[in-house]
Image (cartoon, rainbow, N blue to C red):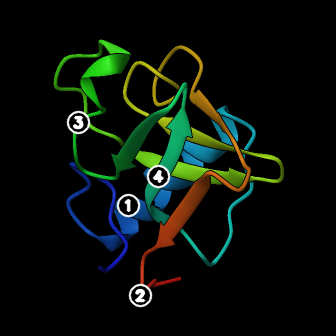
């Protein structure tokens, strides 16, 4: 899967939006970018994917995941109201029950 940010019309805008979100949530910008994140929380398997709505357990309606960042000991999942424009991102502890899948291409 080639790197993208939902609603960004081209690669240049995608990079600008991604950088702005990273800055807002104090996340590093790396060459490897997360496309999908899987983790286990309270014995429930959960998955978040860039461009798809958050799982219903987050009660965010149809809000799309804009970006997922790898931040040392945790992941930050951002939607419009959770780290994208306002609010705090969703934090997921990085452990043996979490796994990230990365975009295979990046136009950096």
Q: CA distance from mark 4 to mark 3?
A: 14 Å
- Does residue 30 appear left or right of residue 82 in this picture? right
Mark 4: secondary structure: strand
Q: Nearer the viewer, mark 2 or mark 3?
A: 3
Q: Is residue 62 above or below residue 36?
A: above
Horizontal and vertical percent position of residue 49:
33, 52
Question: Label 1: which residue?
Answer: 14
Question: Label 4: which residue?
Answer: 38
Question: Label 2: which residue?
Answer: 105
Q: CA distance from mark 1 to mark 2?
A: 14 Å
Seen at 37% across and 18% down, the residue is 58
Seen at 36% across and 60% down, the residue is 13
Quick one: label 2 or label 4, which is nearer the N terminus?
Answer: 4
Rendering quarter of residue 32 = bottom right
Quick one: label 2 or label 3, which is nearer the N terminus?
Answer: 3
Q: CA distance from mark 2 to mark 4?
A: 20 Å
Quick one: label 1 or label 2, which is nearer the N terminus?
Answer: 1
The crowd level at tag 3 (other Cα within 10 Å; few <14, some 14-19, many 20+) is some
Q: Nearer the viewer, mark 2 or mark 4?
A: 4
Nearer to us in this view, 56 or 90: 56
Mark 1: secondary structure: helix
């Amino acid at each position: 899967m080639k790197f993208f940010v939902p609603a960004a019309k081209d690669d240049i805008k995608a990079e600008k939006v991604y950088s702005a979100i990273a800055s807002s949530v104090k996340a590093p910008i790396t060459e490897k970018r997360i496309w999908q994140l899987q983790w286990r929380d309270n014995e429930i398997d959960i998955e978040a994917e860039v461009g798809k709505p958050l799982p219903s357990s987050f009660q965010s309606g149809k809000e799309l995941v804009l970006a997922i960042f790898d931040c040392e000991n945790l992941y930050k999942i951002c939607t419009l109201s959770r780290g994208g424009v306002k609010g705090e991102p969703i934090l997921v502890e990085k452990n043996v029950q979490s796994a990230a899948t990365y975009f295979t291409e990046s136009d950096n």
